[in-house]
Image (cartoon, rainbow, N blue to C red):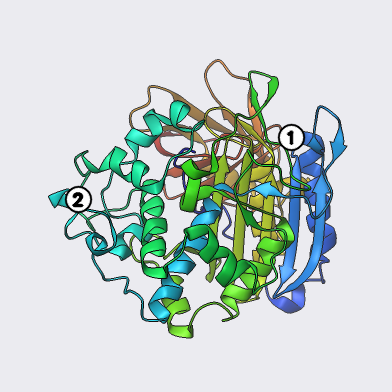
Amino acid sequence: MSARKRVLALMLLACVAPAIAADQRPPVDKVAEARRIGAYYQHRYGFNGEIVLAHGDAILSDETYGLAHIELPVALTPGMRFAIGSFTKQFTAAAILWLQDHGKLRVTDRIAGFLPKPLPATWANITIEQLLVHSSGIPDDVLMDDYPQFRIDPHSPEELIRAVQDKPLKFAPGSRYDYTNIEYVILGAIVEKAGGESWAEFIKGHFLNPLHLQDTGIGGTPQVIERHVSGYVTSHGALTKAVTADPSVLGAAGSMYSTGADLARWVAALQGGKVLHAATLKAMDTPRIETAGYGAFIETLSGAPVIGHGGDLPGFHTQVYFFPGSGDTVVVLSNISRSRPLESPGTYGVTNELLELEADPNGIRPSTGRVASVERASLDALGGTYAMEGSSTSLGITTDGDGLVLATPGQPPVHLKPETKDKFYAAEQNMEVEFGEGTMTLYNYTYEQRTVWARSKAAPGP
């Protein structure tokens, strides 16, 4: 399991919608629109997976696209179970916070009091909170470098911790953010010490069983799981079965499976106060370093908060977002990824449009094919040559009819259609472009890339 990049910021930065008075907007059927978005990305980009929309604990829509087992073939249907990778971390964070609510620990406690000795002296002042928000400085590189040999055989959390504990810290604990998996493996060991039972039994006994999350479990893909979904990896046009890992290697950082509906129910229970005390939930949903809360990332979308976490494994991709203002939850699951990086065809585009749909149901999105009316002078003002620090490539922007053209040396031109006067989508690619004061930001949803380019030369005047 590789340390996934946080795509929440990538998506939300591209989701700034213009304010329009509510009485100017005709009502939009968000369920029907979400189904249209899913179908669009399936047919155009090969999206294969599940989309769930929920309001509170009510499932508004549960739609599947494509196949659960491509070689058989077996169609995906609601209720099939996906490996959810790093979304497991939200359950682990909730376990830590439940233990705090019940007096078993405090997030300010030092981790040394819960782990087998000896431990490195550099770990002496690391706190549980620093593990929760990925600021401990403990390196993940040993696990990642050795992952091919680690993933076949079972390993206890203690073995995984020993594999990294003699490595130097990457930075002083608490000084900066760096996403790792080993931090949540360690949190799983702390749950076991403070909770008096295995991490898996704690999750089942305190969360899954009481909340009736019958399609959610621990174990991952190596064991036989009813209604499971197979994961696939595509590389250079070829599709292969994803190589699975022993669940113990993923552990408290990524070994769970679930369905779209169960994940929405989990979010409803968690955010509805059925899992944690109110003050603890507020602390969980508060960013501590950058956008990281406890097992969640907190961003702002059109002035409103959105709380999310994702998960990537070879063959699987998960995105779950909760909107506190509306009480809505969006879940996107896929069982196809690319080998490196762990991209999922169409998934980022689908998720981005669903976030935009939540922010501005009437807004123009790439799949709508609609075009905003922008004055020619405004388009001309965006023209010029753009460069990125550290890159020898320059990009050109010119006006073409009612939109723009993006020119990259040696590549076909990309036609950009306006969503607003500052934001455009590519007619031919899964990409959006946003202009700022002398800058151009490209959001490539195929490759999970966000790049910022500065204008180095303005377009010549008319």
Residue in front for this viewpoint, 55 or 442: 55
Residue 222: x and y in percent read 63, 38
Q: Is residue 72 visible?
A: yes
The disc placed on residue 256 is: none
The residue shown at (15%, 50%) is 122
Three-letter residue code for mark 1: Tyr
Residue linked to disc 2: 119
Mark in front: 2 vs 1: 2
Q: Is residue 180 left or right of residue 378?
A: left
- Gap in angstroms between the C-alphas marked 2 and 1: 49 Å
The residue shown at (74%, 54%) is: 51
Pick out the residue farthest to the left: 121
Q: Is residue 126 left or right of residue 63?
A: left
Foreground: 394 or 206?
A: 206
Q: Which percent across, then down, holds residue 454?
A: 40, 39
Circle 1 residues within 10 Å: few <14, some 14–19, many ≥20: some
The amino acid marked with disc number 2 is: Leu
Q: Secondary structure at mark 2?
A: loop
Query: Which label's residue is closer to the chain start, 2 or 1?
Result: 1
Placement of 254 over or under 278, stated as above or below: above
* Res 112 → quadrant: bottom left
Few, some or many C-alpha atoms within 10 Å of disc 2 (few <14, some 14-19, many ≥20)? some
- The percent coordinates of residue 256 (x first, y second) are 59, 52
Residue 45 image label: 1
As drawn, 286 above or below 347: below
